[in-house]
Amino acid sequence: MTAAQIVWQIIIGLFLLVMGSVLGTLFKKMWARMQRPTPLSPQDKGRLVEQIAMQEYELEKLNHFVAHPKDLFLFLFQLLIYVLLSFVASFVIYATPTLLGKFRYPDLTLMLLCGVLLCVACILLARYYSDKRIDANRRVIEKRIDEAKSKLGDILR
């Protein structure tokens, strides 16, 4: 390598270092500007207030179930009854036409599908309200309420 090539490589390297530092600060400022929250429209504010109200209601319900475990047991028992009634209804819809000789497969499929979906929903609800998870769910809901209120508070300031 000649001396001129070495000098040009040093100049190009220094130029790239300077450009990188200048562009780096510009990119940081641009990134910070992109991360700033945008002002909410009145509809978004209304949705945020509704969301806070729903989460406060859910938190109130969880606190009630923690304070009154019998109510939680009755709630879970109602879910079990709904699932059983759904499966019994699907069986009746299946058995009655079959005994009469007019089997209708779509009715059975629809009712069994409803029964299975209701069963899955009830299992998920029972898991949500389980004794092990109820405190964690309360903390998550409290955190969401605080975040939503801080968003709403930032906008009102």
Image (tube, rainbow, N blue to C red):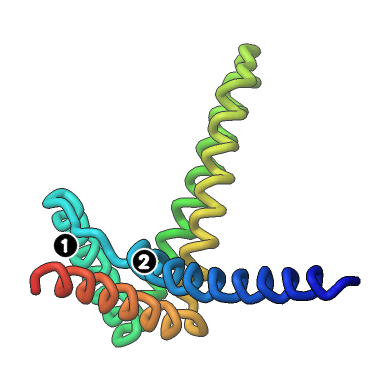
**Is residue 68 shown left or right of residue 126?**
left
Image quarter of the N terminus: bottom right
Which residue shows up at 29% across the image and 75% down it? Answer: 147
Front residue of this view, candidates 157 and 109: 157
Coordinates of residue 55 in the picture (x, y in percent): 27, 68
Q: Quadrant of the C terminus?
A: bottom left
Residue drawn 45% across the image and 52% down it: 82
* Label 1: which secondary element: helix
Q: On the image, which quarter does residue 40 sit in?
A: bottom left
Asked whether 120 or 35 is in front, the reply is 35
The extreme left residue here reads: 157
Q: Is residue 81 left or right of residue 35?
A: right
Residue under pointer 1:
49
Which one is earlier in the sequence, the residue at label 2 or at label 1?
Answer: 2
Count of numbered circles in the view: 2
User: Can residue 59 be seen at all in this image of the molecule?
Assistant: no
Q: Please, which residue is most extreme toward the right here? A: 1
The three-letter amino acid code for the residue at tag 2 is Gln
Q: Can residue 140 be seen in the rendering of this structure? A: yes
* Neighbours of disc 2 within 10 Å: few (<14), some (14-19), many (20+): few
* Relative image position of residue 125 (x, y in whole percent): 46, 64
Q: Is residue 105 above or below residue 9?
A: above
Q: Three-letter amino acid code at disc 1?
A: Val
The x, y position of residue 18, in whole percent, is 55, 75
Q: Residue furthest top?
A: 102
Q: Nearer the viewer, residue 43 or 33?
A: 33
Q: Which mark is residue 35?
A: 2
Q: CA distance from mark 2 to mark 1?
A: 23 Å
Q: Are marks 2 and 1 in contact (CB under 8 Å)?
A: no
